Amino acid sequence: MHKQGALAGQLDRLWVAGAGASRADSAAVQGVVSALNATLQPDQVISDRERLLAFSYDATGERHWPDVVVFAQSAQEVETAVQIAAAQGVYILARGSSSNLSGGTTPVLGGLILSLTRMNHIRHVDVLNRQAVVEPGVINADLQVALQSWHFFYPPDPASHRISTLGGNVAENSGGPHCVKYGVTVNHIIQLEVVLADGRRLLTPTARDYRVGLDITGLLTGSEGTMAIVTQITAQIAPQPEQTATMLAVFASVDEALHTVSAIIAHHIVPSTLELLDKKSLEIVESFVHAGYPVDAGAVLLIEVDGPSAVVQAQTAAIADIAAQGGAHEFRIAQSALEADALWKGRRAHYGAAARIAPHLWIQDVTVPRPLLAEMMRDVIVIGQHHGFNIFCSAHAGDGNLHPIITYDPANADEVARMRQADHDILAACVNRGGAITGEHGIGIDKLENLALMYGPRERQTMSDLKHAFDPNGVLNPLKVVLPPPVRPSDPHWEEPSDHTWTPNTAQEASQAVMDARQAGIQLSVGGYFTGWAMTGRPLTTPLSTSHLRQIVDFDKDNLTVEVEAGMSASELAQWLRHEGLQSPFLPYSSPKTTVGGMIAANARNWRHAYLLGWRDVVLGVEWIDGRGQILRFGRKTMKNVAGYDVTKLAIGSWGRLGLISKAILRLRPLAPQRLLGYTQSDTVDRLLDMALQFGTSASRPDGVVITRLKPGQAQLWIAHESPGAEPIKAWVEGQGREAGLTWTWLEDDAWVSWEDERTRLWQQALQHGTYAEGGVLPTHLSHVINRVALDHLFIVYPASGAYEIFAGPNDVPLNLEGLSRRISEGQYWQQPTDGWDATQDRIRHVFDPDGIFGPSKSRT
C-alpha cells in the first residue's frame, strides 16, 4: 500500500536484506485490509498513513511502518485476523503497549499489527488455586492493584509495570527488581491460550509438574510473538509477604556496593530486591524526581527483604551490619510505606531521568554471573571511554543484570557509528565473562546480529528450525529473535566406528555413539540406570547410558550455581550441596541410582518446594547430544537470560525423546540452619486437604506440603520448610492444627530418607505388580479424585500443584479419572493426548532427531 523501503529508521539495518525477506505486495495487503474492514467494526481497523505512525516504533525509537492495524477485542477476532492475513502471506505482529527496548514490535517488513490493548479484562482470580486468568492487554500494575484486596500479588514487576501489558511481559519473559527472589515471568506462567500461525487457537499444556509432553508454555514465553500470539494467560499468584523492609545503603564507590552484594548472598540471605545506581545515575535521578538520594555518593544499593516478621527483622539487622562492614557511610531503613515508595520512586524513574539529557538513549541489558558484575561494570566504563561516551549504569545487582545507558544524537552519523560499536563491544565483553547478551529486554531486532556472540551456528540453526516448526511460512513477527546461519551447518563428521561404548565417559564419546547408531539404523534408549524406563511407555532398545558422566563441572558458590554431568547421582549431589550449606529444591536425599539428568528428563516432582513449577524453575542451562550427534549447549549460569529461544525448557520432561542430556546448570538456594519436617494425620482426607489449601493462601505457608495415604486408612498431611523462618512457621502451623483439632509430630532431618524410600518402594511395586497412575487437576478438585479412589488404594496428592499419584492393583484405576495423564498397568501404557499439539511436538522432535534414533516421531496416545 505505502511506497516505502523495508529499511526505514534511524539505524542502518542493511543486513536485513540478506535474510531474503521482503514486504508483502500491495495487492495482498489491500486484500487483507478489505477483508478486515468487512469483518470488523470501523474503529477496529486503521490503514491510513498518518494514524499508522503511532504503530511504527516502540521504546527503541526505530521507525518501520506497518500496512494495517487491527484492535482485536476477543480471541475470536485474533483468530479471524490471523487467518485472513496468513492466507495472503501478510506478516502479523502482536503488540501491547510497545514499551519494549529491543525493537521486538517494530514492523520491519510492514504487515498487520494486532493491537491487543483492548483485550484488557481480568477474567478470574482464584486464591485457593493461586492463579489469575487474564487477557493479554491487562496492564501489569492493574493486576497488582486488583490482587491487593485478596492480599495476593504477582511477583514479576518490570520497570515499565505501570504501562506494560501482561501479554508483552510474556512475549519478552520480562524480569524486574524482584526477580532475585521470585524469578522472571516464565516462573509464574501456568498456561497460555494462543493463536498459531495457521489461525488455530489452543491451550498450551500446563506448566505444573503433572504435565505430559514438551514444555510448550515455557518455550513460548519469551519468544517475542514469533511462534504464536497469546490471547489468554493463566498466571500463578502468591500471598503478600507478612512484612517488607526497604533499605538504602550509600557507598563511596560501585566496588564497595557490589562487594556488599556478594557478602549479603554469602550470608545466605536472598533479598527480594538488590538494586544498584551509580554516581551519574544518582545525579540525574535526583534532579528529576527528588527522591532524596545522596548525589555525592559513588553508588547506592536499594535493598528489600520480605517474609515473616521475625525473619525480616533479623535479616534487616544483618544487612545493616554487612553494609557497614562493606564501607556504607549511610544506611536508611524506610519507616513507612510512604518512605519506601519515595526510595522506589527514584529507582523507577531512572530511564525517564536519563531521557531528559540527550536526544536519544541506547540502553543495554547484559547479564553476567553475579560475582562478575563489578568487572563487567568496569568493562563498560572502559568501552565507553574508548568510544567517547560517558556511560552510566543501573543494575539488578542481585541477579547480575546490568543496564548501561549510552546517550547519543541519532542525527549525528559519527555518534551513531561509535554508539553501535560501543554497544557491540559491551555485548562481546559480557559473553567473554560467561554472560547473556540480554537478561530481560529480549533480542528483537536490536541484538539479532549479535546472537552469534553467544550461540554457534548449530544452536542458531536449531532455534531457527524451532521457529519453523511453529510457523512454517514465517508470517509471525519476521526477522526477530534469531536468523539461521548463512549456510546450514553440516552434520558432525562420522568416522568408521572403532571401540565406541554405549556407556560413554564424555560428551564426545556420547556424540560418537549416536552417530554410530544413526549410521547403523539402531534405535537408542537414553538414560542413567533406566530404573524408571517404564514411565516412558516405550520398549527399551539399545541403552545409551549416562551413568559414567558424573562429574561436577563447575561449582560457583558465590553465584549460587552448579554445573554437573547428567549421570551424577541426584542424592549424592544433594548431600554434597548440604555440606556446602546449599540445596537444589528437587534433588532427592535417597535413591542413589536416580541421576540428575534422569530427573530433569522426567520432570520428576519433589514436594519439599511445592510452590515452584518444577525443574523449569531450577535448570538454567543444558548440554545435550541430538539425533545427528551434535553437541548443543543452551543457557548460561545467569539468573536471567532471554537471548534467543529458551530451548532449555524443552529438555525438561522430554523423556529422552530429543536426545541425551549430558550436562545441566542448576540454580541453588541457601539451606537454612534450622529446618522443619513434620506431619499430622486424620481419618478424613478432605479435612487435611482443606487445611493444605488454606496453607497455600497464607504468607506463613511452609515451603512444602503433601498428603499421603501410604497405608490403608492412614492419611497424613506433611509439611517441610528449608528456608529461613522455621520457628515462626512451626508456631503458625501448630496454631492451625489446634484450631482444627489436629496435633503435629516433628521429625529429624534424616526422616527424609525413609519417606522417599517408602514412596520409591510403592512406585516400583505398582509398576511391577499392579497399577501406577498419575495426573493433575486444580488443587481444589483433588477431593474429586480422592473420593473416587478405593479405600484400599494408596496415594500421594500434592495440594500446591494439584498433582496426584495412585498405587493400586492391576487395572484398578479408571481411564476416565479426572485429570489422569498416565497409567501403567501389567505392562500396558496409556497417556493422555496433548490436545491439538501432537503434530507440533512431532515437528519439534524432528528438529532434534530427524531419523528417529530416540524413538518414532508419532506421539503416543
Image (tube, rainbow, N blue to C red):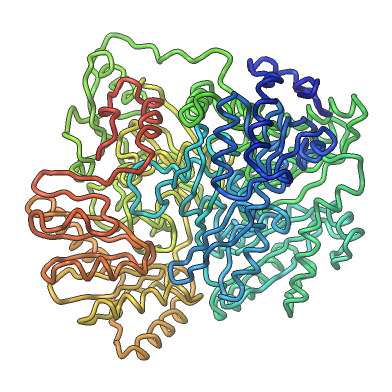
* Residue 820 to residue 481: above or below: below
The residue nearer to you, when weighing 94 against 615, is 94
Q: At 64% from the left edge and 32% from the top edge, which residue is drawn?
A: 35
Q: Total of numbered circles in the picture?
A: 0
For residue 101, side relative to residue 682 (left or right): right
Q: Position of residue 545 (x, y in %)?
A: 24, 33
Q: At 59% from the left edge and 70% from the top edge, which residue is drawn?
A: 147
For residue 241, side relative to residue 206 (left or right): right
- Quadrant for the N terminus, please: top right
Q: Position of residue 109 (x, y in %)?
A: 70, 25
**Residue that sits furthest to the top in the current view:** 496
Q: Position of residue 846 (x, y in %)?
A: 37, 25
Q: Position of residue 34 (x, y in %)?
A: 68, 31
The residue nearer to you, when weighing 70 against 229, is 70
Residue 95 appears anywhere in the view = no
Residue 390 appears anywhere in the view = yes
For residue 99, side relative to residue 148 (left or right): right
- Quadrant for the C terminus, please: top left
Q: Quadrant of residue 733?
A: bottom left
